[in-house]
Amino acid sequence: MSDDSGKRDGAGRVVALCGGVGGAKLALGLQANLGVRLTVIVNMADDFNHLGLHISPDLDTVLYTLSGLNDTARGWGRAGETWNFMAALQQVGGDTWFQLGDRDLALHVERTRRRALGETPTTIAADIAKRLGVTARILPATDADLRTMVTTPEGELEFQRYFVARRCEPTVKRIHFEGRENAMATDDVRQALAADDLELIVICPSNPYLSIDPILAVRGIADGLRAARAPVVAVSPIIGGEAVKGPTRKIMDELGLAPTNAEIVAHYRGLIDGLVIDRADGAEAASLGTEVCVAATLMTDLPSKIRLAEQVLAFGRRIRGARAGETIAVASGDGA
Amino acid sequence: MSDDSGKRDGAGRVVALCGGVGGAKLALGLQANLGVRLTVIVNMADDFNHLGLHISPDLDTVLYTLSGLNDTARGWGRAGETWNFMAALQQVGGDTWFQLGDRDLALHVERTRRRALGETPTTIAADIAKRLGVTARILPATDADLRTMVTTPEGELEFQRYFVARRCEPTVKRIHFEGRENAMATDDVRQALAADDLELIVICPSNPYLSIDPILAVRGIADGLRAARAPVVAVSPIIGGEAVKGPTRKIMDELGLAPTNAEIVAHYRGLIDGLVIDRADGAEAASLGTEVCVAATLMTDLPSKIRLAEQVLAFGRRIRGARAGETIAVASGDGA
């Protein structure tokens, strides 16, 4: 990657805040550009206990995606997965609402075993990432127990109950994060956000309410973003008034929020220095009140992920350049 | 099954004491003859915790064998098993000395989950047996924690460490059962041994020292055998001075015991009313000092299991008949 527009030499570090599938796609594009210079801070608030196992769905999605083990056709889990455990579990009367592939299961069993020995999620994630061949550094947002809870007409639902068992069907009245008073950013996360050679912080196009907010709810992370010398840019999850996938649009409706980039900017106000929006929404660029990069944000294959990542990185360089007194062209995302 | 030689009408119950693979073969033959009239009391002292899971190897062997789910070619585990969990576990650095098939794993996960909720091994085994379609009644010998420990030159080894990880290689200096002072027979086991309609108690040809002794070490079981009105017969695990499979012969050597039926009779003295020995050892029959049934004890296929079971049951009828004053022909195992 050439870097001729920014203040720095382009050899610094980049931090990405990431939830599950959508965010991991951009993280993969960033990793292809940055390699070991990328640190991904991952949402841990959709973790849950199931069948006695500690399951970290977003973290595992990131691990599988960045190691190339993910199933790109199905969109979740591991490629070449088999389901004999589930079939046998059903046979003995087990709880089968959450699909656990035979290969995927190994990660849950091993993580649960290591957690029971007192190892931190951070240590376990680093070790597994290394073993799976992930180049980027993977950091759980917190080692504490933090749980995304969804208030619905059916009562309080743990995130996976809402998301998987109830398929996002109940109306969302409120989202809150259980345990947030004790959920501190790890030292690794604090240091990553405060690093001298940090060039850019990217908020991936994950669901702002269910995937990014529980990262920002961790004590020290939002402050770390505000204090960082590197610019912070978000990639909007909205394309043409719709979310690419998942319940983002439905939740925005239910929370009384317009499904627009203006709403995303309002949501991240005070935290971000710029927003990457899709070409379909290019007309909004001038009215958003922040730096804007217009790009093709739909990531369908690896080249589109790498290209979007390049544009995000170039956007960061331009913001850094502007801070250094240079002129930048806003509302133009192509090329550096 | 016809029953014209015994005191009772042949419609009563039979209890079998059983370890793993070898014992389960006879249990399958007994189940084919007796259906719901069979109760199998299973060794639980080779249970162990592995990867955070509670694993009951002998119990599962019995469950898989009596439900027809076992892999008869491999000799252990489930038929049609896959190993993708193990491959993935190795990938993330997990402990792979104990092979866990993808299907088999379901039983361990579900059992561990239910035990953590406070359910007893007895309740869980009964439910799983029913779900898997096992006709016989399956009873763990105890709901308490009892562990077979093997004293070797390498120190104290848990049974599975000795049996699987160390492949029975270390010399056995002593076998003892950790937790035996608190391991009580369950009410179900006591009642099964004291049942009015109990016709016969069978000690399966499992390893006497590693599989049957830990059943007899459970408080109330040896007494139950001695107090039962039904005769107790054992099927010898020795054929022609060798054990069919497993470490029986090696352990007898290491413990200074001759690998003979006389040694088996001495081991079970005071508990059994008769011993079933193989045709290869028929010449020993007259000198064993107990009732003897000579039969083909090598169980290679289902018919040979059913046939041996028939002979064991007929042997029981003849002992009952003798007690009733009738003449029985000892040292003749064929037919009633």
Image (cartoon, coloured by chain):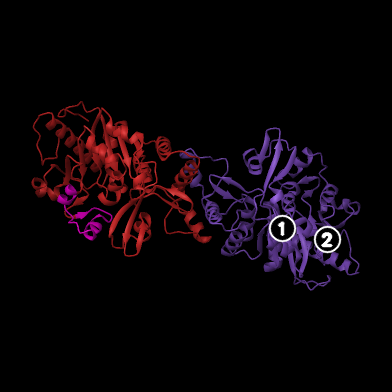
Chain colours: A red, B purple
Q: Nearer the viewer, mark 2 or mark 1?
A: 1
| On screen, residue A72 above or below A39 | below
When asked about the image quadrant of residue B292, the answer is bottom right
Q: Position of residue B277 (x, y in %)?
A: 81, 54
Front residue of this view, candidates A80 and A332: A332
- The amino acid at mark 1 is Leu
Residue at coordinates 69% horizontally, 56% vertically from top-left?
B141
Q: Position of residue B71 (x, y in %)?
A: 60, 53
* B284 drawn magenta: no
Asked whether residue A42 is in view, the answer is: yes
Residue at coordinates 75% horizontally, 37% vertically from top-left?
B173
| On screen, residue A276 above or below B137 | above
Residue at coordinates 28% horizontally, 62% vertically from top-left?
A171
* A250 drawn magenta: yes
Which residue was labeled with disc 1?
Answer: B26
Q: Position of residue B311 (x, y in %)?
A: 79, 62
In which chain is the residue bearing label 1? B
* Pointers 2 and 1 within a single chain: yes
For the N terminus of chain A, the quadrant is: top left
Left or right, A19 with reference to B225: left
Dot 1: element: helix
Q: Which residues are magenta?
A: A242-266
Pointer 2 local density, CA inside 10 Å: few below 14, some 14–19, many at least 20: many
Which residue was labeled with disc 2?
Answer: B333
The alpha-carbon separation of the residues under discs 2 and 1 comes to 16 Å
Dot 2: element: loop
Q: Position of residue A181 (x, y in %)?
A: 34, 46
Left or right, A42 with reference to B267: left
- The amino acid at mark 2 is Gly
